[in-house]
Amino acid sequence: MHRENMVNFWKTIVETMMDGLMVVDADGMIVSVNKATEALTGYTREELIGSPCTILNCDNCSARCGEDNGFSCDLFETKKVERRKCNMKRKDGAIVPIMKNASALVSHDGRLMGAVETLMDLSEIVERDRRIARLSSILKGKDRFQGMIGKCRAMRDVFDLITDAAQSEAPIIIHGESGTGKELVASAIHNLGNRKFGPFVKVNCAALSESLLESELFGHVKGAYTGADKMRKGRFEMAHKGDIFLDEIGDIPLSMQVKILRVLQEKEIERVGDSVPIRIDARIISATHRDLTDMIAKDLFREDLFYRLNVIPIRLPPLRERMEDLPLLVEHLIEENRLKTGKRIRDISGEAMETLMHYQWPGNIRELINAFDYAFVVCRTQCIELSHLPDTLTGVEKILSKPSPSTRDEVTSVLHALSRSGGSKSEAAKILGISRQALWKKMAKLGIKNNFHVIR
Ligand SMILES: Nc1ncnc2c1ncn2[C@@H]1O[C@H](COP(=O)(O)OP(=O)(O)OP(=O)(O)O)[C@@H](O)[C@H]1O
């Protein structure tokens, strides 16, 4: 075929393609686009050519044009980007989900000349996925969503917000008291989002000391400190292409807050003991039971970090604010425990149900789950009665076989703290004003098991 004809055929093919096609030079400047790119971005060819590729504001794209640092883009390091999903901002401000494939263009003598990218519009697919998620939650029953039970207005709003937030790359923060289901929400966001095939890495920020938290999050190099006998990747690196869930973010010390702020701003980390920046591609989902605005007022939490994390806030209501869901949760817990234990318990008495409805549930759903675990241990009939509920709910004392009064007081106070904390040992230890280790020792001494049934 004649060479000139070939060139013309290629031009026709490029202009007929449904996907956007864009060529950039080694500085990230757009040098050529096809018709579909104009339709997809809302910019004309003249507006695009000569502009930096960052004009498209792709949220999952690491291309940057720094005034002083020049242009940088991970594509030029990896030479290839495959099936990268991101949200692009059109000229009219509308956000369009797209999928990018790109290859670096390298000359025969190895010089980097630029890159060619295809941009595929995913709007229809994303909309269809959302519809499927909504329909499947309707089919499974309006009162269940990704392992969460609830049919009150507030919970249905939360389920809708989770569905929409999951599609975004922006940081998400889940606010809610202990035991309200923050971790369940975080994993639902991961499972419904574009990063579901990537890792879901969880870090409990409250459980680690400052220095451990730093090396846990950022990793360390060999010899970074005594005992660091080999290099270790941090959780941010492990979450590459996935989501990182920073639980109890309100409990991190101020010095660590600065470091996390830097990750959000720069999308880079440095391993402890090293100064080589490592690019991070992980969406941040955080959660806290603390009132961060109050902590900001007390100079305990950085305001700039708060605004970076609080882009999509999700507030989980405490159980006492959604008591209309309690019968549904009770029904579910009876069914679940019946299958788990093989006991023939099928019902709960009116009196016991009344007690549950009047209780304040400081430990929320976790405390409710614990109450039913307890009831299933002590109940020997087919119906859970008031006497089968834990003391903290009924205000009745029924504990050890002939314990001394002081032991009995100790057991009561430990059980009370555990019940208030919904089973969380660190919270219970705080309530009692003792360390977590001291609480474990006390529980062992008094015969209180991890799930706080008395075993004497
Ligand atoms: N809506 C719900 N329906 C059914 N089970 C739930 C619901 N919400 C939470 N749970 C259950 O309650 C327990 C506590 O949930 P989860 O650990 O997600 O709470 P949390 O808010 O992260 O608690 P904490 O702040 O103490 O870590 C889990 O066993 C979870 O499966």
Image: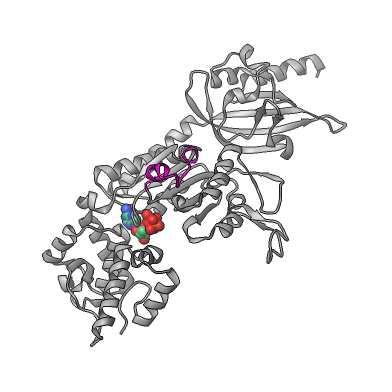
Residue in the picture at 42% in, 38% down: 312
- Please, is residue 37 above or below residue 224 in the view? above
Q: Is residue 373 magenta?
A: no
Residue in the picture at 58% in, 20% down: 36
Extreme residue in the bottom direction: 402
Residue closer to the observer: 389 or 223: 223
Q: Is residue 252 left or right of residue 383?
A: right
Q: Is residue 120 left or right of residue 359?
A: right
Q: Position of residue 265 (x, y in %)?
A: 57, 37
Q: Colour scheme used in the picture?
A: one colour
Q: Main secondary structure of the magenta part?
A: helix
Rendering quarter of residue 5: top right
Extreme residue in the top direction: 46
Residue in the picture at 29% in, 43% down: 156
Q: Position of residue 46 (x, y in %)?
A: 63, 11
Q: Position of residue 437 (x, y in %)?
A: 45, 72
Query: Which quadrant of the frame does ligand 1 lie within?
Result: bottom left
**Range of magenta residues:** 291-305
- Please, is residue 4 above or below residue 264 in the view? above
Q: Is residue 300 magenta?
A: yes
Extreme residue in the front direction: 298
Quarter of the image for the C terminus: give it.
bottom left
Q: Position of residue 386 (x, y in %)?
A: 15, 70
Quarter of the image for the N terminus: give it.
top right
Q: How many numbered marks, from 0 up?
A: 0
Rendering quarter of residue 266: top right
Extreme residue in the left direction: 351
Rendering quarter of residue 315: top left
Q: Can residue 340 be seen from the camera position used here?
A: yes
Q: Can residue 338 be seen from the camera position used here?
A: no
